[in-house]
Amino acid sequence: MQKFIVTPNEAGQRLDKLLFKYLNLAPKSFVYKMLRKKNITLNHKKCDGSEKTAVGDEVTLWLSDETIDNFRETKKAERVPWHFKVIYENDDILAINKPAGLLSQKAKPEDISANEEAISYLMEQGTVTESTLQVFKPSVCHRLDRNTSGLLIVGKSLYGLQHMSEILKERTAQKYYLCLVEGIIEETRHIKGYLIKDEQTNQVCVSKDPVTGSHHIETRYEPLGNNGFQTLLKVELITGRTHQIRAHLASVGHSIVGDGKYGSEGVNDWFRKHYHLKHQLLHSWQMIFEDQKLTAPLWPEFAKILKGVNLWSTYTDLQKN
């Protein structure tokens, strides 16, 4: 006989769903049979699996340890080094500064993403264990393009993941980016349009008018300074669509430096030659929600380029505000 107490990361789901995770090798028919025969009880009472679990509920498995062991496999989590910097952490969320080149979530089974790195970090801190990972895995609450750096939030707990995802879905968080773009911009603008995505090429285009399959987008940007050739922008992402900032700015003639999909080949070649730049200079800089204001400093490569093109002071002045 074994029993366990439902934790905050397990609560809120149906009992049968929780049992399928706990006895992850058992056929579903076996779990339901044990429920019918009262070999599995909830708070010492008969149950059918449809019950919604709550924190502190006691689940008892009136089964031999051998039977439980045969139907329960604890998968060993792969530990990987992490390349991000921690910005903020509490019991529910982990805010990290993601470097360019790191996926937010894996695209293929063999990928190592910020998700896997965050889990390894939390295991190293003792926040999660291989056992707790069987019922809940921390996960990123939103995504950044692989070659976009900056602030990324991970849900450490079920509450943190659900609450943060809801904040982002309802657009009650203010999200600001920094980017270096081609051309001179001297006025703040709020631009709107419609984004169409080509699933085959994973590329988007922007239209002024709605077309079939398009999504409304809004982007606000403020120039922080220019050097006569490029402008450092502070961008507020009002809606959040795939490649929105990159495609929207390109559509008004101000492509992001280093952007291989939407940028200028000549400009990108110049920055590649002089700075070995291989990705767009787009950085998720700040997020404000509820009583939190989280800021991710620029990574050294972006900072070095700003210094090289005489726009570093525009960034340092921003930090003082």
Image (cartoon, helix red, strand yellow):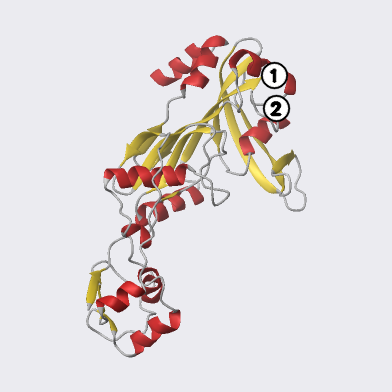
Placement of 120 over or under 312, stated as above or below = below
Q: What residue is rendered at 44% in x and 36% in y?
A: 287
The image quadrant of residue 252 is: top right
* Front in this rendered view, residue 282 or 35: 35
Residue lying farthest bottom?
37
Which quadrant: the N terminus? bottom left
Q: Tag 1, which secondary structure?
A: helix
Query: Quick one: 55 or 130, which is closer to the camera?
Result: 130
Residue 119: percent from the left, percent from the top?
A: 38, 47
From the viewer's perspective, is 168 left or right of 91? right
- Left or right, residue 58 beside residue 188: left
Callout 2: helix, strand or loop?
A: loop
Q: CA distance from mark 2 to mark 1?
A: 10 Å
Q: Which residue is mark 1?
A: 269
Vertically, is 245 above or below 242? above
As drawn, the label of residue 263 is 2
Q: Amino acid at mark 1?
A: Asp
